[in-house]
Image: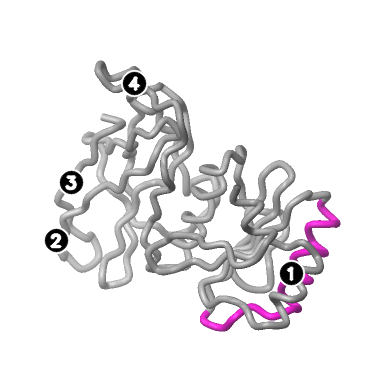
Amino acid sequence: MGGMSQSVSVRCPACGRAHLFAVPSYPCPCGTPVAPPLDPRAEPAAVTHRSWEEEWVTVHCAACDRPSAWPRPELGCSCGTVLRFPVTDVRGAVPGIPPRPVRPAFRPVAIRTARDAVITVALYLRWLGHRGVRRADRRPPSGAGLAAPGVLAWVDPTVRPADARNVECLWLTAMTESATACVYFSLAGYDDEARARADVLGVSLFVLDLAGAPQPVNGPAEAFAA
């Protein structure tokens, strides 16, 4: 069901290794955990190419019936093969689980890969209330870009702190795309010049830890998170 996580046994078609895969769950805005339900009639397939549209699947919350786009379940084998699981959708409410009147705390997703970082930021932007999160039309020099109405966000998963040039480049791109907010998410943090430049330009700076919890590190970011 949409609010219950599943665990399935699967064997890698490339190397034959057996895995126990637990479908990750994500928080609906009403507070109910939502896990994309696996389709028991279809087998997982190896990922040979990626596109933004294929990365996400629409699932209805079992408690409030809200449709949301969540990351499609995937499993990475140690041989390098990535398996993508077919899913079904679930509608309808579960008796005894009322929607919550206030926004719950953000539930982070552990970051192990660059893709995890992008997924975490997409979920965080949606948790803040930004709808229609998608891949940005222009890709940043490193990492990935996400866009929502009025917002441009860059996700930098590199191991070097972002510098002032990265911040300025984001700001200029946001101006050309008429975004009212530009937000930078970095795994490695920022050097002093980048922080100073961001404060002048009004760029929101966040640091991502490996647990997947975005932390604001300047005034514009605190305002954006609020």
Counting residues from the N terminus, which is met first, the one under dot 1 or under dot 2? 2
Counting residues from the N terminus, which is met first, the one under dot 3 or under dot 2? 3
Is residue 4 placed above or below 150 in the rendered structure? above
User: Does residue 175 belong to the magenta stretch?
Assistant: yes
* Residue annotated with mark 4: 98
Q: Any mark on residue 7, and which? A: 3
User: Does residue 36 belong to the magenta stretch?
Assistant: no
State left or right for residue 204 relative to residue 69: right
Q: How is the image coloured?
A: one colour
Q: Residues within 10 Å of mark 1 (few under 14, many from 20)?
A: many
Occupied quadrant, residue 36: top left
Counting residues from the N terminus, which is met first, the one under dot 2 or under dot 4? 2
Counting residues from the N terminus, which is met first, the one under dot 4 or under dot 3? 3
**Residue at disc 2, secondary structure:** strand
Of tags 1 and 3, the one toward the viewer is: 1
* Residue annotated with mark 2: 18
**Residue at (46% x, 28% y) in the render:** 67
Counting residues from the N terminus, which is met first, the one under dot 1 or under dot 4? 4
State the residue in front, 6 or 123: 123
Is residue 127 placed above or below 166 in the rendered structure? above
Magenta-colored segment: predominant secondary structure: helix
